[in-house]
Amino acid sequence: MNKQQSLFNEQSQKCTIQNVGSSTGKSYRAIRHDVVRAKQKQNANEVHHPDEKINQIKNIFENTSFDKKPKILELFAGQGNCTKIYQEYGEVTAYDKKYLKTGDSYIEYHRLIAEKKKFDVVDLDPYGFPNRFFPDIFLLMERGVMFITMPKPYVNILNGITRTHLISYYDEHNPDEQTIVERIALFGLCHWRKIELIDSVDCKSVWRFAFAVERVKATEYTGVRNR
């Protein structure tokens, strides 16, 4: 346990974020950010929000019809909280390098695209922003539902690298929910997938989106005929 961790103990009523900040020289937001990161590494429920995710998954499946038993891809599956729920509905392929040790989600995602695999449901829940998967993640679907977990930019400490990263994907360093949803829809169109937001859950530090994904013909979608 380092100095900062020993100073900060949420279970102690005598220790607050403010006096930790005065002892370490860090701001309130910086201390809060470090605490959240520590909890994420411990897979704490309050930062991974399994109940909110599970309830959303159940609601979407209960209100979505599939032609056959759906094929489900779960990237960054963690310790498998949602995997167990997905197994109740379809055939699940779950990857997580750290906990399940089934494979590196970044590497497997590219392999699946190269092998032209297709899924009816994709769950993208990375540690951090999911932007590195856009727009090619949509190549894994013809028609179905995609769940995406998106950290809220304004609750994170935005250093120069993160600011530039967000600007490159969303044209601004602190995009709001609507901007992010609109840009994800544009990413889908890069591969002629029509993207429609069907559910959004506010989990304090992150948004949990559910999108309907459908492949469209470019000529029909744009109203342009090939000559």
Image (tube, grey):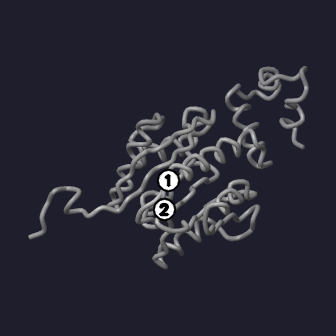
Q: Residue 82 falls in which quadrant of the image?
A: bottom right
Q: Residues within 10 Å of mark 1 (few under 14, many from 20)?
A: few
- Check disc 2 and report the residue beneath it: 66
Please give the label number shown on residue 64: 1
Residue 117: x, y in percent? 49, 74
Q: Furthest-left residue in view?
A: 227
Helix, strand or loop for disc 2: loop
Question: What is the distance, in whole Å, between disc 2 and disc 1 at their CAs?
Answer: 7 Å
User: Which residue is at the front of the view, 112 or 162?
Assistant: 112
User: Which residue is at the front of the view, 109 or 4?
Assistant: 109
Q: Residue 182 falls in which quadrant of the image?
A: top left
Question: Could you tell me the amino acid type at mark 2?
Answer: Phe
- Quarter in which the C terminus is drawn: bottom left
Q: Is residue 145 left or right of residue 50?
A: left
Residue 188: x, y in percent? 38, 56
Q: Is residue 39 left or right of residue 199?
A: right
Label 2 close to label 1 by CB (< 8 Å): yes
- Quarter in which the N terminus is drawn: top right
Q: Residue 175 falls in which quadrant of the image?
A: top left
Residue at x-position 67% and y-position 61%:
88
Helix, strand or loop for disc 1: loop
Residue 21: x, y in percent? 77, 25
User: Which residue is at the front of the view, 193 or 156?
Assistant: 193
Q: Residues within 10 Å of mark 2 (few under 14, many from 20)?
A: few
Residue at x-position 48% and y-position 57%:
65
Question: Could you tell me the amino acid type at mark 1?
Answer: Thr
Residue 222: x, y in percent? 20, 56
Residue at x-position 46% and y-position 66%:
67
Q: Is residue 205 above or below residue 189?
A: above
Q: Is residue 70 above or below residue 179?
A: below
